[in-house]
Image: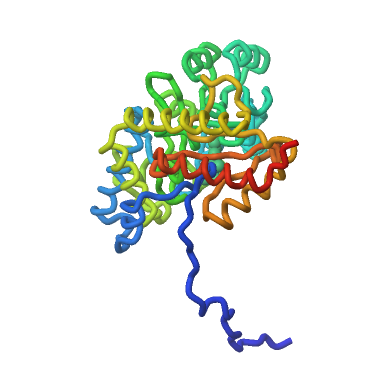
């Protein structure tokens, strides 16, 4: 048959203007980006190896070192959202047949275990219900039983709403000759985090939450122990795109001249750089305090409304993402829809096992102000007045 080469017409939607309403994003992310960050994203493109751009990469690296509180040389941003950083950690740290101990108390442990298995490695899982965290004893039990090469925990759980205590965990993993990998996507910048002091071997994050940048390039850092494990691999990293040694070279983290590995996410790196610069200017400790204060204001307001938080133990709540039990007599979705339709305000539903059972409110970075918390409480109260048939 003869192939047709006639050009078909473009879809009519492309002739319409782009529609981006202004919304207040009080879900678990993305949160609203800082105007300074959005402005940076609109700057002209540079080449991915131009000196002005590699300088911006260096600034970004310094910003990540600051928010992670690490001096690790191998600190950079993976091209892709938080999931890309997760994949990068897994494919670099594990070879086929290697065992990882994956702590599951929400969606992120489940996803990470899936990635471990797709890499041909073995995921041994220990679990807690969503809304609860692991004790050092439980993790030690897993270390003894499974002798893993890697332990994974989620510091800021965005599906269950917990903050996993990390002090002592790095030392424990090292005692059993395992590396510690930590997910900080939904908490970095919003609560104390000390990668070096807490002996975390590999840490990753995302841009679109507390860092108040668009979802794009994702911070990651490897310490010497992790680099030694990567250097001693018998097989090549199974992903070309996420090969940490290649990325470290492109990010100027080794002696060699920077090589083209892939085209850097130019505009996204500008944006991330500005999000990090914003943090450096205001200071991490101020940010941690503001997140704690706004979270407390939210808890008080919710309790006054007669709502119950999923995470009972206040000391292990993620200040950046709060999970609220949907009371009997309310359809969770009606409330979410009411807030969006009437106030262009996002409140999210539950994820994983908590779908339909909780709402999630995020207070992150640029959005972390008492005014935004009050507005969210007011809108929630209004929606409940409308939809909660108390009897
Ligand atoms: N980990 C956690 C704790 C998260 O909250 C998220 C995003 N919700 C991710 C990983 C994945 O990030 P992304 O959606 O940017 O790929």
Q: Is residue 357 above or below residue 168?
A: below
Q: Residue furthest front?
A: 391
Residue 318 vs 246, above or below: the answer is above
The way the protein has been coloured in the rendering is: rainbow
Q: Nearer the viewer, residue 311 or 270?
A: 311
Give the percent coordinates (x, y) of residue 111: 63, 38
Image location of residue 300, percent across then percent down: 51, 29
Please give left or right for residue 49 compared with residue 99 in the image: left
| Ligand 1 rendered quadrant | top right
250 or 218, which is in the foreground?
218
Residue 163 drawn at (x, y percent): 53, 26
What residue is shown at x 68% (from left), y 46% (from top)?
Answer: 387
Instruction: Identify whether 222 is placed above or below 12.
Output: above
Asked if residue 341 shows in the view, the reply is: yes
Query: For the point 62% across and 39% down, which residue is it?
Result: 359
Quadrant of the frame with the N terminus: bottom right
**Residue situated in front as seen by the camera: 287 or 98:** 287
Residue drawn at x 32%, y 62% as measured from the top left: 45
Would residue 356 appear left or right of 287 to someone viewing this image? right
Quarter of the image with the C terminus is: top right
Residue 283 position in % (x across, y down): 29, 33
Q: Is residue 82 visible?
A: no
Q: Within the image, what quadrant is residue 121 found in?
A: top right
Is 4 positioned to the left or the right of 240 in the image? right
Q: Between residues 158 and 292, which one lies in front from this camera angle?
A: 292
At 57% from the left edge and 43% from the top edge, which residue is drawn? Answer: 380
In the rendered image, which quarter is residue 160 located in?
A: top right
To which quarter of the image does residue 234 belong?
A: top right
Q: How many marks?
A: 0
């Amino acid at each position: 048959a003869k192939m047709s080469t006639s050009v078909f017409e473009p879809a009519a939607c492309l002739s319409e203007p782009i529609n981006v309403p202004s919304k207040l994003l009080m879900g678990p992310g993305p949160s609203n980006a800082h105007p300074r960050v959005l402005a940076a994203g609109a700057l002209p493109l540079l080449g991915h190896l131009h000196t002005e751009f590699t300088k911006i990469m260096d600034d970004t690296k310094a910003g990540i070192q600051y928010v992670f509180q690490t001096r690790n040389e191998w600190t950079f941003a993976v091209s892709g959202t938080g999931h890309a950083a997760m994949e990068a950690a897994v494919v670099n740290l594990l070879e086929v047949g290697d065992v990882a101990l994956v702590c599951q108390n929400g969606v992120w442990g489940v996803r990470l275990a899936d990635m471990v298995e797709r890499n041909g490695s073995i995921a041994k899982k220990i679990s807690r219900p969503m809304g609860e965290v692991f004790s050092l004893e439980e993790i030690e039990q897993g270390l003894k039983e499974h002798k893993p090469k890697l332990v994974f925990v989620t510091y800021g759980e965005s599906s269950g709403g917990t903050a996993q205590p990390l002090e002592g965990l790095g030392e424990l993993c090292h005692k059993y000759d395992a590396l510690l990998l930590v997910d900080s996507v939904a908490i970095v910048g919003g609560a104390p985090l000390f990668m070096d002091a807490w002996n975390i071997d590999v840490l990753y994050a995302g841009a679109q939450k507390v860092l108040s940048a668009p979802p794009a390039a994702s911070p990651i850092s490897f310490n010497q122990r992790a680099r030694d494990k990567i250097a001693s691999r018998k097989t090549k990293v199974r992903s070309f795109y996420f090969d940490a040694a290649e990325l470290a070279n492109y990010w100027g983290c080794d002696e060699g001249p920077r090589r083209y590995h892939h085209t850097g996410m130019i505009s996204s790196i500008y944006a991330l750089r500005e999000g990090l610069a914003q943090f450096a200017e205001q200071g991490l400790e101020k940010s941690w305090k503001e997140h704690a204060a706004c979270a407390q204001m939210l808890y008080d307001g919710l309790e006054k409304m007669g709502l119950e938080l999923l995470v009972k133990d206040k000391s292990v709540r993620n200040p950046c993402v709060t999970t609220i039990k949907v009371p009997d007599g309310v359809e969770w979705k009606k409330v979410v829809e009411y807030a969006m339709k009437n106030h262009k305000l996002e409140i999210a539903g539950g994820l994983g096992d908590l779908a339909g059972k909780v709402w999630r409110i995020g207070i992150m970075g640029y959005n972390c102000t008492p005014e935004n918390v009050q507005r969210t409480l007011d809108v929630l109260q209004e929606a409940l007045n409308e939809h909660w048939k108390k009897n």
